[in-house]
Image (cartoon, helix red, strand yellow):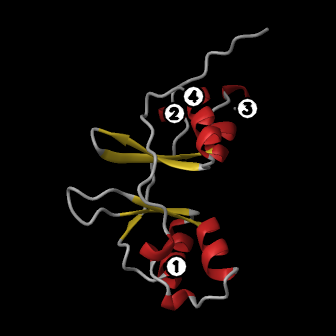
Amino acid sequence: MTIRNWGPVRDCMNTSVTEVDGRLDVLNALKVMKKAGTTSLIVKRRDEQDEYGMLLFSDIAKKVIAENRAPERVNVYEIMAKPVLMVRPDMEIRYCARLFDGFGISHAPVAENGKIVGMVSYYRLVLHGLPDLD
């Protein structure tokens, strides 16, 4: 049995994170996603006691398109996930993958000192977490 030394999430996270207001309509959120070249958005906290939210392409597909709703009439806060599980940048990639599997999630914000510093997904864990692929 080979034991692999997996690196930290910091090594594979995407540091380009786009935040939006939860009151934004889904059509405009999609425009933000397209411009940023991302499939996920962080939804800003309303105040210091609030929690971050997250909007994924899959949320839009399941809760807007599949239900035949008009994206310009649905607000992000209606379909986002909130609160979201966050991971630390120093968490080992293998534990992050186990966390995703255990909670049935595919993306998570990476937070350090209460501030979001990145985003990680299965895609990033696999394609950017394996140094042998470089």
Is residue 45 shown left or right of residue 59? left
Q: Residues within 10 Å of mark 3 (few under 14, many from 20)?
A: few
Tell me the amino acid under the disc marked 1: Lys
Q: Residues within 10 Å of mark 4 (few under 14, many from 20)?
A: some
Label 1 – label 2 distance at C-alpha: 28 Å
- Tell me the SS state at disc 2: helix
Label 3 – label 4 distance at C-alpha: 20 Å
Q: How many marks?
A: 4
Disc number lying in front (3 or 4): 4
Disc number lying in front (3 or 1): 1
Tell me the amino acid under the disc marked 2: Val
Locate the C terminus and report the quarter of the image it occupies. Answer: top right
Residue 5, position as x, y percentages in the image: 62, 16
Q: Which residue is mark 4?
A: 95
The answer to whether the residues at label 1 and label 2 have Cβ atoms under 8 Å apart is no
Residue 3, by quadrant, is top right
Tell me the amino acid under the disc marked 3: Leu
Q: Earlier in the sequence, mark 2 or mark 3?
A: 2
Q: Earlier in the sequence, mark 1 or mark 2?
A: 2
Q: Which residue is mark 2?
A: 9
Q: Which residue is mark 1?
A: 31
- For the point 33% across and 63% down, which residue is it? 44
Q: Earlier in the sequence, mark 4 or mark 2?
A: 2
Q: Which residue is mark 3?
A: 133
